[in-house]
Amino acid sequence: MNDKLLPLDIGPLNPTGWGLVIGFVSFAIVYAVLAGRLLPRAAAIMAEREAKTQGVMDAADEVRTEAEEIRAQREAILAEARHEAAHTRQRAQEEGTALIAAAREEGLREKERIVAEGTAAIEAEKVVAEAALRADVDTWAHSLAERIVGEPVPAPSESRRSGS
């Protein structure tokens, strides 16, 4: 066989015929070993890795879906709680307004009762005071008449007795 395959002088890059045959045979042996043993193992490892990765991604999707459901439930519970709180606040405000109105009415009734009692008490004291004053009016009038006239004036009960 020809020593050089190409008629050019390119150094070690120009293979010989036997070198080329040995290279092809070596390549075939290495390829057979790699394809028979190493590549199936690598493919199995890659498939296992892909399966685990896909499993983790599926689990992550399930967790994400579950988290979204929980979040939606939480939002619904919060919305319901807000609604209930607003309803409770409104009911408390209405009850407070009713209590204030009832207390105001009770206060007005109490005021009217106190004013009525006070008016009655004043009226009773007025009657008593008037009666007391009427009893003493003759004495005071007599005393005042003596001061004005400057001399003793006979008491009205005496003048009535003497005139009768």
Image (cartoon, rainbow, N blue to C red):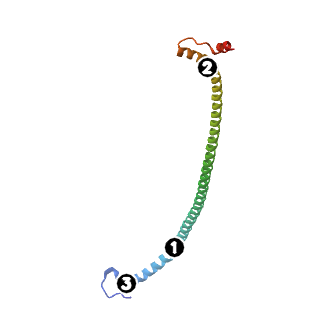
x 51%, y 77%: residue: 32
Cβ–Cβ under 8 Å for marks 1 and 3: no
**3D distance between C-alphas at marks 2 and 3:** 165 Å
Can you say which quadrant of the picture contains the N terminus? bottom left
**3D distance between C-alphas at marks 2 and 1:** 140 Å
Sequence-earlier tag: 2 or 3 = 3
Front residue of 164/4: it is: 164
Q: Report the amino acid beneath label 1.
A: Leu
Using the rendered view, name the quadrant where residue 73 is placed: bottom right
**3D distance between C-alphas at marks 1 and 3:** 31 Å
Q: Position of residue 117 (x, y in %)?
A: 65, 32
Sequence-earlier tag: 1 or 3 = 3
Sequence-earlier tag: 2 or 1 = 1
Q: Report the amino acid beneath label 2.
A: Val
What is the secondary structure assignment of the residue under circle 1?
helix
Q: Position of residue 14 (x, y in %)?
A: 34, 83
Cβ–Cβ under 8 Å for marks 2 and 3: no
Dot 3, how many residues are within 10 Å of its Cα: few (below 14), some (14-19), or many (20+)? some
What is the secondary structure assignment of the residue under circle 3?
loop
Using the rendered view, name the quadrant where residue 109 is placed: top right
Q: Position of residue 133 (x, y in %)?
A: 62, 21
Front residue of 85/157: it is: 157
Residue identified by numbered label 2: 137
Residue identified by numbered label 1: 39
Q: Report the amino acid beneath label 3.
A: Thr
Residue identified by numbered label 3: 16
